[in-house]
Image (cartoon, rainbow, N blue to C red):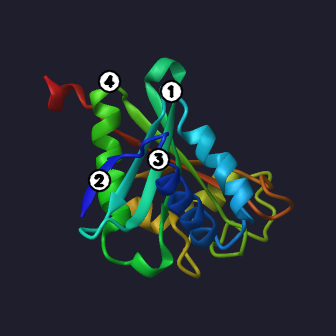
Amino acid sequence: MQITDLNPTDTHAIQQAAAILVAGFRGYSWPDLDSALEEMHQVLQTGKICRAAYADNGTMLGWIGGNPQYDGHVWELHPLVVSPTAQGQGIGRALVYDFEAQVHMRNGLTILLGSDDLDAMTTLSDVDLYPDVWQHVKAVRNLRGHPYSFYQKCGFVIVGVVPDANGIGKPDILMAKRVQNKARDS
């Protein structure tokens, strides 16, 4: 497997990436190829990160994007997607670690991401998180394979939740990870 920058002039690769986005998110965030292509053009703007993982035969396996925030100290990871036929092979983890290296090279300090719960996959979904949001976060459990557990395995921690971000009882779980550490990088 090889991970490289996604070339913004490579229309074939952009089409592949958009198709993976629709398939990987089962049409939730990007219900069709047109909406996915629109996302691709956003992710491929100058100053952002967009990296793709390719099999040895040149087939795109997945990709990751990100954009700087807080004067480049924080980078939002958005999105990460692996082709459904290639999931469970370490591709997502490799893309996350590559993304961390890219952020580190740009002197970023933290990576932030949101992981929506649209399908009652965690104990944070389909409940009223108010008024004591942190009690719910503290007791969160993964009920049906929600991606937050994947990100925890990659070193991310839950730093918050946006209740009702996607409608009543459908929160966005906010996660972050420090990329640079003064003791480590000195």
Q: Amino acid at mark 1?
A: Thr
Foreground label between 3 and 1: 3
Secondary structure at numbered mark 4: loop
Q: Which mark is residue 107?
A: 4
**Mark 3, residue position:** 10
For disc 1, the neighbor class at 10 Å (few under 14, some 14 to 19, many from 20) is few
- Report if residue 155 is visible in the image: no
Q: Residue at x 39, y 54 (%)?
A: 52
User: Is the residue under label 2 in contact with that under label 3 (CB below 8 Å)?
Assistant: no
Separation of disc 3 and disc 1 at Cα? 15 Å
**Mark 2, residue position:** 3
Foreground label between 2 and 4: 2
Q: Amino acid at mark 3?
A: Asp
Choose the circle earlier in sequence order: 3 or 2: 2
Separation of disc 4 and disc 3 at Cα? 28 Å
**Mark 1, residue position:** 46
Q: Residue at x 42, y 42 (%)?
A: 7
Choose the circle earlier in sequence order: 3 or 1: 3
**Residue 66 point in image, percent of width and height:** 49, 40
**Residue 48 point in image, percent of width and height:** 48, 32
